[in-house]
Amino acid sequence: MSGAAVRTVGLTKVFGSHVAADSVDLEIRTGEVLGFLGPNGAGKTTTINMILGLLQPTSGYVELFGEKADWTQSKMRRRIGTLLDGVELYPYLSAKENLQVFRKAFGGIPLCSVDKVLSAVGLSSRADDKVSGFSQGMKRRLGLALSLLPDPDILILDEPANGLDPKGIKDLRDLLKGLARAGKGVFLSSHLLHEVEVICDRVVILRKGKVIAEGKVNDLITETPTIELAVDRPQEAEKILLAKPEVSSVSRTGNRLTVQYNSCKTHAGTLLDTMPGLDNHERLAQLLNKSLASHGIFAYELILHSGSLEQVFFDVLKEVG
Ligand SMILES: Nc1ncnc2c1ncn2[C@@H]1O[C@H](COP(=O)(O)OP(=O)(O)O)[C@@H](O)[C@H]1O
Ligand SMILES: [Mg+2]
């Protein structure tokens, strides 16, 4: 069984009376992209800085490759790459020259690594161009190339998509996925739920310094979207809904019914195909509502759960209160 490359154990940081990170336990594994999700102020940067040894924990500790983290060991530092906001590139040097400067500073890195990392981040064709002419996305990728120079096993990135345009975000996403496929572990924080949903294999959701949910993206996303209804004749309504071919199951709690359906299936000749401008989810909600109304049952609440991670994220936040 492959162990975690990075493990935090009860990692806690208190600023004055404010608990910014509260007993955070998480594991970063090689070969996967782990998302660290949470609203602004949740404690993501604080946690990341403690993992990187830039901030002393109030309590708890970090394990790197099965040993207690010791950042005085360059051997250990080299196995963890990061992309910090503060990294300054030399604007009047080329991409390649910037990498040469850092290669010398790191020491012991073969010359061929420069071309290798340039290729890894898709900048080979711009190797000799001055960084001053680079877009934000290209600079971010060059920053990533710098962090890849010592060939780290793990990359820890704090909001790497910030400030990038959609193309830059997509390029970065493909790049990080590729790195994970090549066996590296990627840990990235984000408050952009959609970004995390598409890029990460697993996510850890942080709220007010605490991990409130953790798991595989696919497990956190409910497999099928659902429609929740509140009615005053739930038993009768359940029967009516179950008789609909689009509905796969109905669960009932008090006056609330949760309807599951297969979002891929459309049924020719039903309302689903005749309501342009609405997605299937909305069409089905209308269809169910209409059926109930034709039996004199009027839903007094109707909630569409899309089954995206965003929904999970907000549901989790709601549950915790
Ligand atoms: N150096 C610091 N001194 C005092 N409070 C801090 C410091 N750094 C962060 N905080 C507080 O800790 C909380 C978590 O911040 P942060 O880790 O930056 O969150 P995130 O990265 O998720 O947006 C916030 O309330 C922030 O104001
Ligand atoms: Mg932050």
Image (cartoon, rainbow, N blue to C red):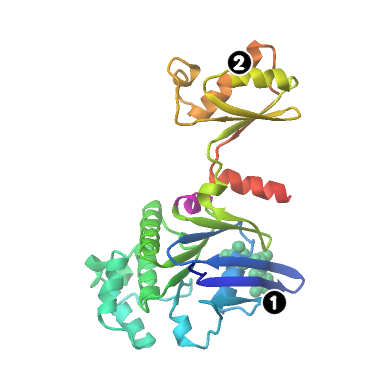
- Tell me the kind of residue under disc 2: Ser
- Residue assigned mark 2: 291
Q: Disc 2 or 1, which lies upstream in sequence?
A: 1
Compared with residue 294, is residue 81 higher up or lower down, i.e. above or below? below
**Residue at 77%, 71% in the rendered image:** 17
**Residue at 74%, 19% in the rendered image:** 233
**Residue at 64%, 62% in the rendered image:** 41
Q: Where, by quadrant of the figure, is residue 301 drawn?
A: top right
x, y percent for residue 167: 36, 53
Say which of 163 and 54 sits in front. Answer: 54
x, y percent for residue 299: 68, 22
x, y percent for residue 62: 59, 76
Range drawn in magenta = 193-198
Say which of 262 and 160 sits in front. Answer: 262
Residue 94 visible in the displayed image: no
Q: Where, by quadrant of the figure, is residue 256 drawn?
A: top right
Left-right relation of 11 to 112:
right
x, y percent for residue 166: 40, 52
Residue 218 visible in the displayed image: yes
Q: How many callouts does the rendering have?
A: 2
Q: Which mark is residue 28?
A: none
Q: Are marks 2 and 1 in contact (CB under 8 Å)?
A: no
Q: Which mark is residue 59?
A: 1
- Tell me the kind of residue under disc 1: Ser
| Helix, strand or loop under label 1 | strand
| Helix, strand or loop under label 2 | helix
Say which of 44 and 28 sits in front. Answer: 28
Instruction: Say whether mark 1 is within 8 Å of ligand 1.
Output: no
Label 1: how many Cα within 10 Å (few below 14, some 14–19, many 20+): some
Left-right relation of 34 to 92:
right
